[in-house]
Image: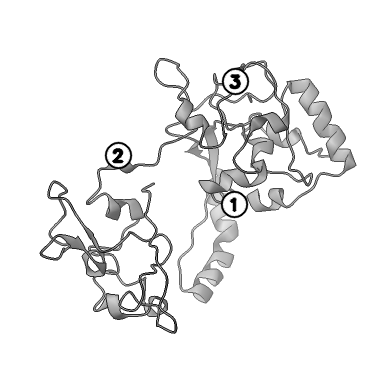
Amino acid sequence: MMAWLLGTGIAAAGAEDSYATTKKLPPLHHVTGVVLPEEMKTPKRLPLREDRELRCPTCHGVEDIDRVPFRLIDRSLPDFLRGGPYDELDAFCYQCHEENRFKRPNVHIMLDKSGKLQEEHCTYCHEEVHRERDRPLRAPDYKLRLPPENLCYGCHLKTPHFNALEHQESKPDARMKLHMKDSKERYGIILPLSREGKVMCPTCHAPHQPGVIDALNPAAGRVDDADLETGVSYREHPWDAVVREDKKARLETLSEQSGRRFELGYRRIDKEVLLRLPAKNGELCLACHQFDE
């Protein structure tokens, strides 16, 4: 994902929140007032000033946008970003910026093509690189930049899949903890909980690419059947028709109430990666849950 530059500055006292009266820009905003170098090519539909300075109307087609308070701007207008709407914000950014130079790296790809550790990817999450990757570490030795329950949110949403938020709010009871302990011993894995004893992303997900940590290390995880560049993939399944019919009436009601169109189908996981145990066969779920007959 394109790395946006944040606008900075202090708003004038009592002024409206438009660019004409303040240098403070909204979050996730490109800096303005910069002069672009001659070698940087920009499309004709993104007009610069004669001195090649980038201003609000360079990117936005809304009339007098540099004089309109931010809170009054309709971002749903097709020309809010010139040439829009865009399905992905990156597509707009890459009209000027070279994708290969500004694309956010997949930091989970920690080994290069020769199998050498890309240490710069380690330090996105860790303050220092751990040299003894075959030795289990205690939690304080991880030297994480943030508590593990918050670290993933620097790149990922709290709701990347169904029940993600519900899991993160849950705290295993004594019975479940005993079952988790048994699973860890049986599979030779870890199922870490947060400092408050709650489920977190790393409880189920192993953030390290297979091969980074010794396979016998409980922190390594066990799932390695997908390309990290591609990530999780799915395949069509006959239950799709059943799910669509079951949800049809409820989705139509929701669409009428919201003015938006919703679709919900069903597909089976085909390939998965970066998990403590396989999820597509239920093994990961059963490491914590017991479904009594």
- Above or below — where is 45 with respect to 117? below
Residue 158's tag is 1
Q: Residue at x 32, y 60 (%)?
A: 31
Q: Which amino acid does the dot numbered 3 rest on?
A: Ile
Q: Quadrant of residue 184?
A: top right
Closest to the observer, 37 or 206: 37
Discs 1, 3 touching: Cβ within 8 Å:
no
Q: Mark 3 Cα within 10 Å, few/some/many (few <14, many 20+)? A: some
- State left or right for residue 200 relative to residue 111: right
Give the spatial CA distance, label 3 vs label 2. 29 Å
Give the spatial CA distance, label 1 vs label 3. 26 Å
Residue 213's tag is 3
- Above or below — where is 112 with respect to 235? above
Discs 3, 2 touching: Cβ within 8 Å:
no
Discs 1/2, front: 2
| Upstream in sequence: badge 1 or badge 2 | 2
Q: Residue 165 in the image: x percent, y percent?
A: 66, 53
Q: Which residue is mark 2?
A: 101
Tell me, yes or no, if residue 109 can be seen here.
no
Q: Which amino acid does the dot numbered 2 rest on?
A: Arg
